[in-house]
Each structure stands twice: as structure tokens, then as C-alpha cells.
Amino acid sequence: MKKIFVIAIAFILFPFSFNNGKSQTREIFPVIVSDENPFYALIATPAALFYDENIHVKPLLVENFSNPSKAVERFKRLYEMNDTIIISDKDVVNASIDISKIWKRSDEAIIIKNNLEGYKLGVAIACLGSYKNIPIFVANKIGEIEERLKEMGIKRTYVCGDIDGYGEAIKFGSIEEVNDFMIKFLKEKFGEIKYIVITNPIDIENARVIEKIEYNFSGKINSGSTLHGLNILKSGFNYSSTHNFRVPYDGFVVIRIELINKDSGDVEKWGDRLFLHLSTPDNITFLYASTAGGVPEIDENGNITTDKLVYQTCIFNKPGEYTAEVIGTWIVKRQGEYEMKIEIEKVDRGNFPLMRDLSSLASYVASYHKGIVFADDFSFAGGENTDIEGLIYPVSNEKLVKPCNEHILKIHEKINSLLMNISGLKNLKDLQQYYANNPAHIAIMGDTTMIPMFYYNNPDSDYVSGQGTASDFIYGDIDPNPADLENDSFTYYPFQENAVGRITGYDAQDCSALIARTIFYTHIVDKLGEWKNNATVQTGTGIEFQMIPVISPLMNILKSFIGFGPVRNEPTKFPTGESKFINERISDDFSRNGFNVFSAKGLDAQRVGLLINRKGGEYQLKSNYIFAFNHGTYYLYEAGDMLEFDQFGLGLKTGLSGKGSFDVRHVINMEYNPSVAFIESCLVGKIEGLIPENCLSQTYIHAGVNSFVASTRYTADPGYLEPGLIFKGFGIYGYINASINLKMHGKYPDLHFGALLAEDFIIDLIENNSSVGIALRNAKNKYLPKDANSTFLWTPPLYFSGDPFEVIGWNFQPEETNALDKKYVCLHEFTLYGDPAFNPCSISECCVRF
């Protein structure tokens, strides 16, 4: 007769229940599961990873067998996948029975109901299968698996969902019950819990399309490159084309656009590209995109044959006429052609995933780190959580920022409750002090719809960069001050107690490859020889500024006449030497710790050169650590234009910077080793409301990088060394003084903003053997105490997309200020993509010091 116990009394009735059930010692095999069913990854988790006295682990990969991710294929080349178990094209019930045959006998098993409710609980309990070395079954009815359970000698089952158990059954009815059970189990088995995965199980369900219409446009436009200046003048500055399209539906509507450059023949040679702007019926331009941020078609040699962009967004209750504007930059051609298809889909919901099925891997990565999975529906979208019309993502809809933050604060309360349960502490101050000294790693597995970012204050909020400062900082910050969420309750400056990172990817395929590269890092690095001891430091052009007497004021007046906004008191791009000293200082950090440093300055930091050989791309591929300091946006960053006609900010862009940029369309086809990258450039870390294929951060992960740190918003930097002696903001005194100090005293100029954060992150990694999450957490906690009181004449953003229509304005200050608001932005905006517990110096040879 079956015995069923609710989890609330199971601990009393079964004081022995945390002991491992009797499962024989067994072999372990790599597992590849099809992406067709997320349950496959759950049932494969204990097959690929289990504990007895030690951990036994093999790769668990998710693959689309008809269209495999290059990330998965590359890992399989780097790691010998011998005797691989493959789960594909099979009913999940039978698949779970088949994979259970790697256990001849077992006292215990996990049973998950084959529906969404069962999956929600199963995501959190699957790691128990690894900890106890027991199989996981998925079934609609107990009768489907009963024979196999009997054959294995199962005596006790852990049951998720509306399905009968077998033998002594412990049933879980909520995620809280699962968490309570797992916390007690893990503390008894391992003594502590220092790793938490936060994930959202509804990421396995796409929105359902109710109705659909399509628009098709094509056209021929003048090139916007200033190399065709005469042609632009003759056309009356006419180098764009506008198309209107109507959204006829209320409710949730997905807008999907495919833009194709029909004259793609010179993309590889010259860097040609198209730009796309989208505007609402209210005439608000909310999107600046480019084919440089798209996935191109390539030939057998990897060269681009079709330059194109696929972009999508979603709106709620905002029918009307929208506008799509297309701009082209062809270097040789005076004109070029394009095609554009716009699909309008009415869908049933807005909280659909942009990165699918990441939750299916949560238990695998948690099991490896002896951690726990906190799984629930944490999603936020306009129209779902609040009845506000317009774009459903807060990044592009300022009215959603407050309700989104309120939603996250409720999640934050749940996380603190979980931490109290884990630590046994009862009040917030004790909790803050405990984790300040004993930080845990918190991994977020989901996109920013499934698990949203918090929006801190930002003086530069706009529709180009996004609203507020999007950040994951709050997930590691135990005590934000309820009356002032920019600050904390128990510390003077904000302090992040726990280390946070997002384990992401284009989809579950890429995410599984990232996890595999992280877990089997040593195995991979052992084959790469000297690579592990290499670092590259790259600083581009156009990131230094001076207020040149007479010239700068005249240029600012001229801008207003040629249509680049009102007269603003802005400095001019002009060399100061700041980026040179930043490059040399961070290069010295690496070299004195035994690394071979590949330094690239100015145009040498381009991915490839136009007429001169540039090695920025080559240096990145051969380096374990990558630091780059350039202008950029969410889909690219670039070191500069070899014909810099826009020295005075007049919008005179040749477009040649597109040749050597690190952009989505090129990085996607590069093969990186499992590097750590820190990119100081505007918006490169931005992912909110974007499909991951448009995001450079996710493309680096796809290409093979293990950890990627970048900012979600405009990144500030002064661009000069000292204010000047005679003229405010102009002169060579700063450069001379810095050179003397370096030569006479070995002292580099001070770092500020992202460069300071980057240096502390790098030093903590290579000198203190820290994980990437702890290193970034420590760098952030040091940042404001170091930089809060420094003062500046200006703090220009490091933003550039190559788009001739985009204008970012900022003002020269008559007196120096500490720009504290922008320093808070700097603290919050830098985001880690990758496993926060990843330690690139975990093998002793990785950090060779002389």
C-alpha cells in the first residue's frame, strides 16, 4: 500500500530521509539532449552529474540536431564526447524510462508530472537526483512507469505535480516546499549552501500567434558616407527612406522586421551597412539598429554574402501607424538597394522568453556547485503586470520603470527570505553582515523578461540608451534602503554582499555550451598551451577631449546651423594621452603578474585593418583576458575611423569604422577560447527587450567567451588627464606631468569610472584567485570609496553606433564637479554574463607570476 506524506511532516516521519538511497556505483557518460523538449535536460541531469563520496560529472549539452549551434559543435571538438548518451525524437515518458537503465537498482526516484506545473517544481528538485544518484521519471500517470519502478526496487519517490507517487511518496506542492526540503538536505550533506540559481520555468513556452499580417518594402537610397559628400549635397542631404506601416490590433502585438542589404558585395572589404530607426504613432523614435547587429549569411570561407538584420519587439494596446526609416552607408557605391519585410503578429501574452529553455539547465549547474535552484514565475512585461500601453519593455517605456522596480522588490524580499532560511539568521542586519563576510554566488538563468533587471536612476535616460540604469546589482544587495533605493541601509555607499552573474546565451543550446566550457575549463585550457598566459589591452580613438579656445565654441555654433541640435558647450575630440596611460597601466597590471600582453592603441585596436594590418581581432582570439576601451553600442564597439572627418562632432562620418568594428555580424563567426572579457564601452552589455542575436554580449558568449562584463548604459570617462593651467580644459600640462611622474616615480595617472572598476576586477582575478563574480563584486564595493570625490570638467559617454542620424549631447561644466550621479550609474551598469563562480585562475598554471 502506498504511503503519501506531505512535505511539511516528512522531516518528522523520516529523520533518515536525507541519506542517500541505495544506488549502485555506476559509470557516467556525456549526454546530449534534443532541444525539442525541456524535460529531456531534467531527466539527463543525474545521468551526467552525480555524487557519492566525490563528484562525478560529464557534459550535458542541448542541441538542435537539424540546426546545431556552432557553440555546441565547437565544444564537441574541444572535448572528447566518447560513449555519449543521446536523447532525441522520443516521448519523454519513454525517454525517462530508457535513461533510468543506467541504474540497475535504486531505492529512490523522482517523479515529475508531464505538464507545466510539474516542470515548474521539477526544475527545482532535479538536482536532488544528482545529489542522491537517483533517476528522474516524467509521466502523465503513474501506471506508465510503474513497471520500471518495480523492476528497479524503488521504495521511496519524490513527487512533483498532480500525479501519484510510488512506495513512500514525498509530494511537493509548491516551490517553498521544495526549497525547505533542499535547504535541509544540502546543509546536512555539504554543511553549507553558497550557490543559488534563480530561474523562471515559464521560459519553455512561446507566445501563441492569434493573427498575423505582413508588409513588404524595398527601395534605393543614397549612401550616407561623407566620402560621397558632393552627392549628398546635390540630393539635399537626402540619404534615408521612410516607410509607414499600420498595427491594427489591440492587446499584445509582436513587430518583427527583416532588413536586407541588397548591395552586400563590399561589406567585408569596406564595412558597408544599413541602419534602421523605428518610431511609434506618437513620433517617438525608440529603436536605433543596424545590419551590423544582425546574423549574416556567409560563404564557405566565412565571408558575408548577405548583410541583414532581424529585429523584434512587442507592444501592448498601441495600434496605429508606425514608421520605419532606413539609412545606408556604402563606401564605394553612391547608392544602394534594400528590402524590408515587417510581420505584425497578435499574440496571447507578453511574458514570453527571448532566451528559451534556460531553466532546463538550472539543476545541472546548481548541482555542480552544491547549490539550490530558486524557480518561480518572476517575469515582468507591460500588459501582464500592469495595464500600461506601449512597448512592453521598461527599457523603452518610462511608465513601466516604477512598476517593474516594485515587482523586483517583491522578488528581492523572497531572495532575502531564502537567504535567511539558508543562514538561519532572523534579522536583516545580521544577514547583511554575514554575507558581507561570507558571500554566496547567485546565478540568474533567464533573459530580462523572465527575470527583469532593476532600473536605478540615470541622468542620461533616453530612447537611444534606454530608461534608467538597468542592473542586476540588487540581486546581490541584501539591504537597499527603502527610502533611497540608490543607497543601502547599513553601509555608507551601496555594498553588494553576494556575487551575481547571468548565465545566458542565444538559447538553451548556447547556454549548455557555456556551462560545459565553464565546468570543463581546465580540460580545454590544458590543450591551448601558452594561450592561458596571454592578455590583450585595447584602447581606440576618439575617446579623448579638450576644450580648444575659439575652435570648440565655433564648432558648437556650426553644429546648430547644420541641424545637429541646439548650441551646446561641448569639448572637441582632441588627443590628451589619457587612453595611452590607461592602456599602459592595465598592461602593466598583467605583465607584472606574468602575462604576455598584446597591447593595441588607436586604430591598431580595430578588429581588422583597411589598408594597414590591424591585429585587434587576432589579439583577442589568442588571449585569455581581454580588456577593450572604445566607443560602442549594444551591437558593436569600434576603435575608430581611419579617415576621421568628424573630429569636431559635425556628423561627418565616413562609415569606414564599420570595417574594423567588433560587431555581431563578425564576432558570431569568430572562434574564441574560454576567455574573460571586460569591455568599457557604452551599451555593450545592454540586452533588455532585445532578441539575444542582436546583442554583442550574447554573441561573444556564442563565440566561446566564458565571462563577459560590460555596461548596460552610457559609460562615462573624462577623456583628459588634468584640467589645464591657462585655459580650462585645454593644454599639454596633464600629459607632461603624467609622463614625468611615470618616468621618475613609476606612478601612472589615476583611473576613473569603468577603467578603475576594470582594473580592480582584473587584479582581484589574477592576484587573489577569485571567481569572476566575486572579483566584480569586490571591484564594485571598492569603487565609490575610491572615486566618489574625484572631480571633472565633463564626462562624455563612450557611445558610437556609426549611425549618421544619432546625436548624443552633453555639456562642458564651468567648474569641476564630482559627477556623483554618473558614478552611481557606473557602479550599477556593469553586468556579468557567465557563471559568477567561474574561476579562470583555478588551475595553478593559469596565473604564472615571476
Image: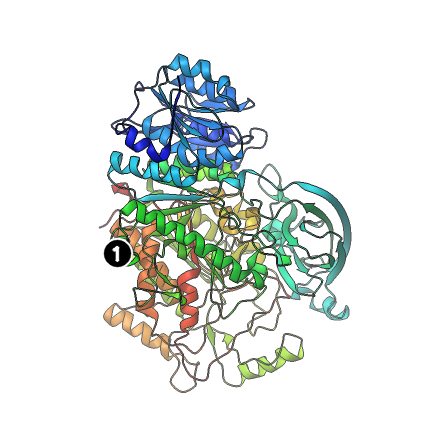
The residue under the point 65% across, 57% down is 275
Q: Is residue 723 left or right of residue 352?
A: left
In this rendering, the count of numbered labels is: 1
Vertical arrangement, residue 650 with respect to residue 584, above or below: below
Most foreground residue, 10 or 17: 10
Decide: few, some or many residues near mark 1? Use Cα within 10 Å; few <14, some 14-19, many ≥20: few
Residue 264: x and y in percent read 67, 49
Three-letter residue code for mark 1: Asp
Vertical arrangement, residue 589 with respect to residue 645, above or below: above
In this figure, which residue is indicated by the disc labeled 1? 430
Q: Is residue 191 left or right of residue 248?
A: left
Residue projecting furthest to the bottom: 726
Is residue 520 visible in the rendered structure shown here?
no
The residue under the point 48% across, 23% down is 86
Vertical arrangement, residue 676 with respect to residue 92, above or below: below
Residue 776: x and y in percent read 35, 55
Residue 49: x and y in percent read 36, 29
Q: Is residue 674 left or right of residue 607?
A: left
Vertical arrangement, residue 672 with respect to residue 381, above or below: above
Circle 1 SS class: helix
Q: Quadrant of the N terminus?
A: top left
The residue under the point 48% across, 37% down is 120
Is residue 42 visible in the rendered structure shown here?
yes
Identify the image quadrant of residue 749.
bottom left
The residue under the point 28% across, 32% down is 12
